[in-house]
Image (tube, helix red, strand yellow):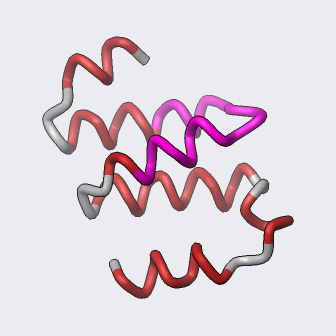
Amino acid sequence: MKIGKKLLDEMPENYRNDNITSNSAIDMLMKFGDVESAERIFRSMKTKNIITYNATIKGYVGNEMFEKALDL
């Protein structure tokens, strides 16, 4: 997880705003239980697609946060 977070921190800004990169980051962070960071990325995204919502909902369920999954 440290490598993934370091990669995100050092990533140029124009890549951070890319949906594919953001969706992958949400998926990775949720798998490692860093829900807060994943939510931060989700909120910062200007355009969300079905993959964004799927990764976030799947992450909530994987972290047993069922209410948040339903609320989304």
Q: Residue visible at 22% across and 17% down?
A: 67
Above or below: residue 34 compared with residue 11: above
Does 39 sit above or below residue 38? above
Q: Position of residue 43 (x, y in %)?
A: 59, 35
Q: Quadrant of the C terminus?
A: top left
In the image, taking residue 22 as reference, residue 46 lies left or right, namely right
61 with respect to 6 (left or right):
left
In the foreground, 47 or 36: 36
- Quarter of the view holding residue 50: top right
Give, as a single range, the part of the protein colored magenta: 37-54
Q: Is residue 49 magenta?
A: yes
In screen coordinates, is 46 left or right of 60? right
Residue 14 screen position, x and y as percent: 85, 65
Q: How many numbered marks, from 0 up?
A: 0
Residue at the image position 38 percent from the left and 31 percent from the top: 57
Query: Where, by quadrant of the figure, is residue 21 drawn?
Result: bottom right
Q: Residue at x 52, y 60 (%)?
A: 25
Question: Going by the picture, which residue comes out furthest to the left?
Answer: 64
Location of the N terminus by quadrant is bottom left
The answer to if 69 sits in the magenta stretch is no
Residue that sits furthest to the top in the current view: 71
Q: In the picture shown, does residue 31 fall above or below 4?
A: above
Residue located 19% across and 30% down the image: 65
Magenta stretch, overall SS: helix
Please give left or right for residue 58 compared with residue 63 in the image: right
